[in-house]
């Protein structure tokens, strides 16, 4: 899978990976994909919840990598 942008949030703790992903997704067009790398153990719960709440598609959640398609 290809992506248009990548965010390395390695070492950041909740809620920073999701907050930074939200900001990065704002700059993308609808349908574009963000690759998020987050090693925070809470990310496996926070990222899917964020996607569901904001209307984005979570294409892959193979922690520490998450592929998010902007809704």
Image (tube, rainbow, N blue to C red):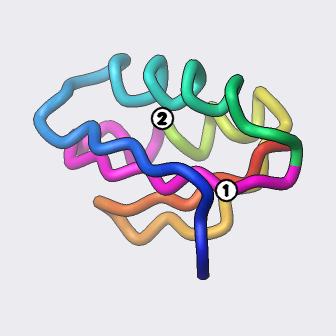
Residue 36 covered by magenta stretch: yes
Which percent across, then down, holds residue 19?
Answer: 47, 18
Q: Which residue appears at 78% of the width and 44% of the height?
A: 70
In the rendered structure, the answer to whether residue 33 lies left or right of residue 38 reads: right
Q: Residue 33 carries which label?
A: 1
Q: Does the magenta stretch include residue 25?
A: no
- Seen at 85% across and 37% down, the residue is 55
Image coordinates for residue 24, horizontal then vertical, percent = 56, 29
The mark that comes first in sequence, 2 or 1, is 1
Quarter holding the C terminus?
top right
Q: Residue at x 37, y 18 (%)?
A: 15
| Pointer 2 local density, CA inside 10 Å: few below 14, some 14–19, many at least 20 | some
Q: What stretch is highlighted in magenta?
A: 31-46
Q: Is mark 2 on a helix, strand or loop?
A: helix
Q: How crowded is mark 1: few (under 14 residues within 10 Å), some or many (20 or more)?
A: many
Q: With 22 as the anchor, is 13 left or right in this view?
A: left
Report whether 57 appears left or right of 45: right
**Where residue 25 sits in the image (x, y, percent)?**
65, 32
Farthest residue to the bottom: give it. Answer: 1
Judging by the rendered image, the residue that carries numbered circle 2 is 46
Q: Is mark 1 on a helix, strand or loop?
A: strand
**Horizontally, is 50 left or right of 53 in the view?**
left
């Amino acid at each position: 899978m290809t992506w248009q942008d990548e965010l390395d949030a390695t070492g950041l703790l909740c809620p920073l990976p999701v907050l930074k992903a939200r900001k990065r997704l704002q700059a993308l067009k609808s349908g574009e994909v963000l690759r998020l790398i987050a090693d925070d153990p809470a990310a496996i719960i926070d990222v899917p919840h964020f996607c569901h709440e904001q209307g984005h598609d979570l294409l892959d959640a193979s922690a520490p990598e998450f592929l998010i398609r902007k809704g």
